[in-house]
Image: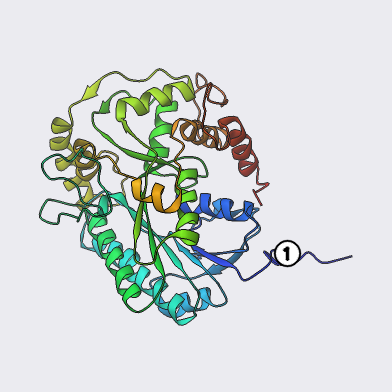
């Protein structure tokens, strides 16, 4: 009887390391790399849920990126690193919360870059945030590009400031001769959303009939598959020291709810709460919850509402021209996200329909029906490798 090879041994070459592989971006990236025949090692926290990787043909390393020595051990032998791990938050939080953001995002990135540099592990692609990109102060809806500086004089979230400092760490590493490229992400929509993300939770609440009103505003969204494609392009074509913005399309919240209704069959709410009114309520609620119930999940935070009020758009011309980036839109991504959550049992509303392909979708990527089948396969534990 022959023994089964260890994870990844049947894939040629040294492994590529993915940090944050159980998060939304990382889980989609790991699946893409495996589909491309890449040997993958995933860096995980030992005490965190890692359902996103069940059944996948990956090597596993366990470390907290705030621990440089442990990070060095995880990086050893790898060639190429995708650093997707980050603490994401839209609240101001207390002192401990802010320190955790800084240490996970900033110090963690510094450690990953240093470990990669010392191990001669090759290029590092770091997931950035569109919230760390500047905008036109007189007209925030003007599409932002990579040249626009973050404006620190306005009120900003600790998370936003931490992601600006992440970019500083990347530039410091580049100054030392390291190849680092930043893949800037807008709001992600798509499947393999195990945690789930804020948008994933909102979609589940919508499908379960728990969303009765919405806050007006808009934002730039990116399909998970588009963002993953952007990361791969950065690894193979990106210029060291540069960042590239990856967005699929701008949508208002009303537009998003239309897509939710199409995917789920659940009627959308039509009552819009003015963002200015909701902002006042959110300020009071967030102040109280952050100090007295810090673990209580906050949906409508002042930071999230501020971003919606700005109605920011992304200019992806640089990624298109330099990397050949071709976004597909988010309609199929919404259907894919719904199929994923439905087939995992997160939708309990009997009036919600079974997932199906998005009719008339012209995206060149996998159709929503194929995405639903993949979601079913993942949910059943078969994996995607």
Residue wearing tag 1:
10
Residue 252 visible in this rendered orientation of the protein = yes
Of all residues shown, which one is farthest toward the right?
1
Of all residues shown, which one is farthest toward the front?
321
Q: Where residue 73 sits in the image (x, y, percent)?
A: 51, 78
Q: Is residue 158 above or below residue 193?
A: below
Tell me the colour scheme of the image: rainbow
Q: Is residue 346 above or below residue 187?
A: above
Which residue is drawn at the image coordinates 65% and 48% (left, top)? Answer: 383
The image quadrant that residue 285 belongs to is top left
The image quadrant that residue 61 belongs to is bottom right
- Per the image, label 1 sits on a secondary structure element best described as loop
Q: Where residue 232 sits in the image (x, y, percent)?
A: 50, 55
Q: Where residue 385 sits in the image (x, y, percent)?
A: 66, 52
Q: Where residue 20 sits in the image (x, y, percent)?
A: 46, 59
Q: Is residue 156 above or below residue 302?
A: below
Query: Which one is in front, 360 or 375?
Result: 360
Residue 208 visible in this rendered orientation of the protein = no
Which residue is drawn at the image coordinates 34% and 26% (left, top)? Answer: 255
* Residue 233 in the figure: left or right of residue 180: right
* Residue 226 in the figure: left or right of residue 241: right
Tally of numbered tags: 1
Which residue is drawn at the image coordinates 36% and 54% (left, top)? Answer: 244
Q: Quadrant of the N terminus?
A: bottom right
Local crowd size for mark 1, using a 10 Å CA cut-off: few (<14), some (14–19), many (≥20): few
């Amino acid at each position: 009887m022959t023994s089964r090879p260890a994870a990844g041994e049947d894939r040629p070459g040294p492994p590529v390391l993915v940090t944050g592989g159980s998060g939304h971006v990382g889980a989609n990236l790991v699946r893409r790399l495996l589909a491309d025949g890449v040997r993958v090692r995933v860096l995980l926290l030992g005490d965190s849920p890692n359902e996103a990787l069940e059944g996948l043909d990956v090597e596993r390393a366990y470390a907290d990126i705030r621990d440089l020595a442990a990070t060095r051990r995880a990086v050893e032998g790898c060639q190429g690193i995708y650093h997707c791990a980050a603490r994401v938050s839209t609240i101001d939080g207390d002192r401990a919360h802010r320190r955790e953001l800084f240490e996970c995002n900033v110090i963690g990135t510094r450690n990953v870059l240093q470990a990669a540099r010392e191990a001669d592990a090759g290029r590092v692609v770091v997931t950035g945030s569109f919230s760390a990109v500047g905008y036109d102060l007189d007209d925030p809806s003007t599409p932002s590009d990579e040249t626009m500086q973050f404006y620190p004089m306005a009120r900003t979230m600790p998370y936003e400031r931490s992601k600006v400092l992440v970019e500083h760490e990347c530039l410091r590493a580049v100054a030392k001769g390291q190849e680092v490229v930043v893949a800037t992400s807008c709001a992600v929509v798509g499947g393999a959303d195990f945690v789930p993300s804020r948008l994933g939770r909102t979609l589940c609440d919508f499908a379960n009939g728990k969303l009765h009103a919405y806050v007006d505003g808009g934002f730039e969204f990116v399909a998970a598959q588009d963002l993953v494609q952007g990361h791969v392009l950065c690894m193979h074509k990106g210029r060291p020291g540069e960042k590239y913005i990856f967005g699929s399309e701008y949508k208002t919240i009303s537009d998003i709810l239309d897509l939710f209704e199409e995917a789920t069959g659940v009627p959308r709410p039509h009552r819009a709460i003015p963002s200015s009114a909701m902002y006042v309520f959110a300020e009071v609620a967030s102040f109280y919850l952050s100090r007295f119930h810090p673990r209580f999940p906050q949906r409508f935070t002042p930071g999230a509402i501020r971003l919606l009020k700005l109605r920011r758009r992304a200019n992806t011309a640089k990624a298109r021209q330099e990397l050949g980036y071709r976004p597909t839109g988010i309609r199929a991504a919404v259907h894919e996200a719904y199929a994923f959550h439905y087939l995992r049992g997160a939708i309990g509303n009997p009036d919600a329909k079974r997932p199906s392909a998005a009719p008339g979708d012209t995206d060149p990527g996998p159709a929503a029906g194929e995405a639903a089948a993949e979601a079913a396969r993942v949910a059943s534990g078969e994996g995607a490798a």
